[in-house]
Image: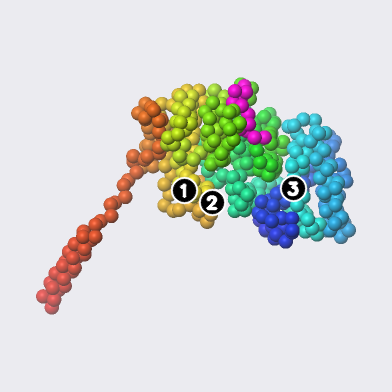
Amino acid sequence: MFEQTFKNIDDILHKDAGCGSELDYVEQTSWVLFLKYLDDLERDKATEAELSGKTYTPIIAPEYQWTIWATPKLANGLIDHNALTGDDLADFVNIQLFPYLKKFKTSADSADTIEYKIGEIFSELKNRIQSGYNLREVINRIDELRFRTHAEKHEMSHLYEDKIKNMGNAGRNGGEYYTPRPLIKTIVKVVAPQIGNTIYDGAVGSAGFLCEAFEYLKHSKTLTTTDVVTLQKKTFYGKEKKSLAYIIGTMNMILHGVEAPNIVHTNTLAENLADIQEKDRYDVVLANPPFGGKERAEVQQNFPIRTGETASLFLQHFIKILKAGGKAGVVIKNTFLSNTDNASIALRKQLLENCNLHTVLDLPGGTFTGAGVKTVVLFFEKGSATQNVWFYQLNLDRNLGKTNALNEKDLEEFVELQKTKAESENSWSIAVKDIDQSTFDLSAKNPNKKEEAALRQPTDILAAMKALDEESAAILDSILDLL
């Protein structure tokens, strides 16, 4: 049901003058979907309160509740034909609803409440659906959805992820927001966070790493009441520079079940590394920072190793912001392992001396749909120098692409072998003492990979063909002799 509803909404928005791309479809679907989700959440909380003999005070004032302005119902359950539509609906949303919801940012008790997040979301968003008639159709479609059961919420969040994935096809750098979920799940599995850890992504995008870490921890044990509060309030932290990504990430976490995500709208790299104190540090870092960007000189001054490469600045930030003993799984371009510029050499040296870079996963081209760059995942722990690095090269018997994406089964061997750092045709280890101490080159060169059989020379092929012809002729002659 969710899938067809999303498709129908895209068809409606495609007709609207205010929505020109998949990014607009996701953004506009998001705020309507969020308000419907919020209404179902409030009803669930009211039911829980009633069952325990308490009273529940709704977050949203009556006149701004979904069932009043969006979908007033008749006795038969159908939407009242007098419900707002056309210019009346557009005016209500733009002039009354959005300004009302924005005020939550200043009226909320604290930043770690869902009220504050509502205010932040509607301070950043604008209603781009110009036709109130199109908006009415979208609302009617969204109202058909239910988020009451765990299965419904899971299906909806999964399909919302698919919509975010499609943003990569829409230009405007939409692909920056999406890391393949099978890869994220594998990184989370290998890093293996525990309840009580603080988990951080400084390039949060659509919050895929934080959502998957939440799912992992939620199913890691039978949760106590304290565990639930810990996961909701004291576990997941992120920063995001871009407005749309920040909004999508915040809503994605809320739709996955984290009511007040600790995601901040800020430029992570504008923070001076020297200002990071122990209280600012985290137990776990999970991230796929943007690569290929060029940062301005004033941003580079925040880092001891000056470079314009965005991903290299993020890596410095992640090393600094990890607690001693903290663990990380970070995606980065594979050229980081071998670049010969001074900044790359200095950063590799710092990583090897300050952290235990225990695992490098070398990914094939096409892992990131629409991006031709090859990437690796660095798994490291802060606090002790690296002695040995275990490499795994993911070799697949197919080319990856939009219709042939990476899946979890592709990564099963890596997860299994990584536990013991075993050698195989696809995996090997190197000792840091054996690498070039002037460049710290960590190129992923697999010594165990079977060499492809060399192509034969044309003269050899002709000779073999001649021999086969002569053999066939001899067999034929012997048969004729017997006749």
- Residue type at mark 1: give it: Gly
Looking at this view, is 229 or 7 the one in front? 7
Which class describes the residues within 10 Å of circle 1: few (<14), some (14-19), or many (20+)? some
**Which circle marks residue 370 in the picture?**
2
Q: Earlier in the sequence, mark 2 or mark 1?
A: 1
Q: Bounds of the magenta span?
A: 266-277
**Mark 3 — residue?**
31
- SS at badge 3: helix
- Residue type at mark 2: give it: Gly
Q: Among all residues in the image, which is located at the extreme top?
A: 278
Q: Are marks 2 and 3 in contact (CB under 8 Å)?
A: no
Front position among marks 2 and 3: 2
Q: Residue at x 34, y 41 (%)?
A: 448
Q: CA distance from mark 2 to mark 3?
A: 27 Å
Q: Earlier in the sequence, mark 3 or mark 1?
A: 3
- Residue type at mark 3: give it: Trp
The tally of labels here is 3
**Which circle marks residue 365 in the picture?**
1
Image quarter hosting the N terminus:
bottom right
- SS at badge 2: loop
Q: Position of residue 203 (x, y in %)?
A: 60, 37
Magenta stretch: includes residue 465: no
Residue 443 visible (yes or no)? yes
Looking at this view, is 337 or 236 the one in front? 337
